[in-house]
Amino acid sequence: MKLMCSVLLLCWSVSLAAEVRTTRNDLRKFPDGFLFGTATASYQVEGAWDEDGKTENIWDHMTHTHTCIIQDCSNGDVADDSYHQYERDVEMMRELGLDFYRFSLSWPRLLPSGFADRVNEAGVAYYNNLINEMLKYNIEPMITLYHWDLPQRLQDLGGWANPHIVDWFGDYARVAFEQFGDRVKYWLTINEPREICYQGYGATEKAPVLNVTGIGDYLCAKNLLLAHARAYHIYDDDFRSTNGGAIGISFSAKWYEPETDSEEDILAAEEQNQFEWNEYVHPIYSETGDFPPIMKEKIAAKSVQQGFPRSRNESVYQTRPVPSFYDDLDTGFYQPSDWESAASSWLKICSSETDQLDGSNLDQSQNLASIGSHTYGTDMLFSDIDPGPYRNGPCYLTPVNDYHQQSAALPL
């Protein structure tokens, strides 16, 4: 399987140009071959939440059931109204000079029951209109199949914790490839697996806010990876030769550095990286497959200590190898307290002066070890991919917009 991954950054780029280092006084410009684009998610922009056959998704259900779970009590019922104003959206893309636009399909808009028994022609028409409008002005579409808005009917059956979702997602992916694959050459199966599984199933930060950490997040991770593999192989086996496109998966990632040169802190940083994003990268792109060995070992040992009859982290191996967190990890991490927060508290505004560690201004963790998260981590992430332990291939950097901050007022 070829590597095609994405890392959460503030701009979207594809570039094959060599890195050129300049001083601050030098003229800076983007290299030749650098392509600009932007990205959205269907729930963030489409609106029309119950129009033309679309059914409820997990974000609709969450925001309608708990009306102020979003900090300002907003929801995506109307959002940017892109469902009705896609032509103006494309006009703004032209005004921005975009080369690419990454958007996601709404699963319940395309398949109202969640299953492939009936395709919603109104949903197909909307996406066809959007794609054709973009291509008319030479803007390349990139489609994400799943950007967090699972049909609520499937969530009622367990969602990503139900192993049958591998079949459901494969059927959905096939419908999308059949409807749009003749014009769309860039596909992403799933956006940010960690956020889906840890924040949605293991915690309460995102829909469906299950808060079953250490079990729900691991079940989600296994099934999500298998679903990605199913969609990948459907495209690879049945559509790639005809349509000539590319398909991959989009990861969010942070890089963690040891606070000191001690063996304990170095090990803690490495294990944090393994649990944080290699949980999803290792099964797909490593030569050995499955979850990282340190994850399997630590979770299995702790499961025994807790009285479970088996590990809470099941292998992802099935007929095709696919390609919780912190309680099992036993480490802590921090960011410098003087870094200014952006709209979301986890996102820090860092200048080049804060790229390097300065132990004097770090808040110490009370856990086993402390780990820093830093802006130069992007370089380290790519160093870990190439020439790291994973099979090499093209890597795309794409953005993801943060839609909400959860209110602490909601008891979950």
Image (cartoon, grey):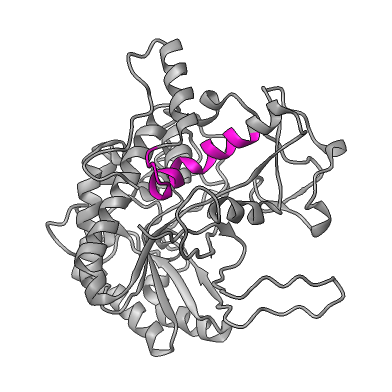
Q: Which residue is depicted at the point 67% across and 51% down?
A: 377
Q: Which residue is depicted at the point 47% across and 65% down?
A: 394
Image vertical order of residue 397 relative to residue 410, above or below:
below
Q: Which residues are magenta?
A: 269-290
On the rendered structure, is 98 left or right of 312? right
- Image quarter hosting the N terminus: bottom left
Name the residue furthest left: 117
Q: Nearer the viewer, residue 202 or 333?
A: 333
Q: Position of residue 371 (x, y in %)?
A: 69, 35
On the rendered structure, is 404 left or right of 244? right
Q: Position of residue 145 (x, y in %)?
A: 34, 60
Q: Position of residue 99 (x, y in %)?
A: 50, 81
Q: Which residue is depicted at the point 36% across and 78% down?
A: 130
Q: Confirm whether residue 53 shows in the render.
A: no
Q: Which residue is depicted at the point 52% across and 51% down?
A: 252
Q: Is residue 285 magenta?
A: yes
Name the residue furthest bottom: 136
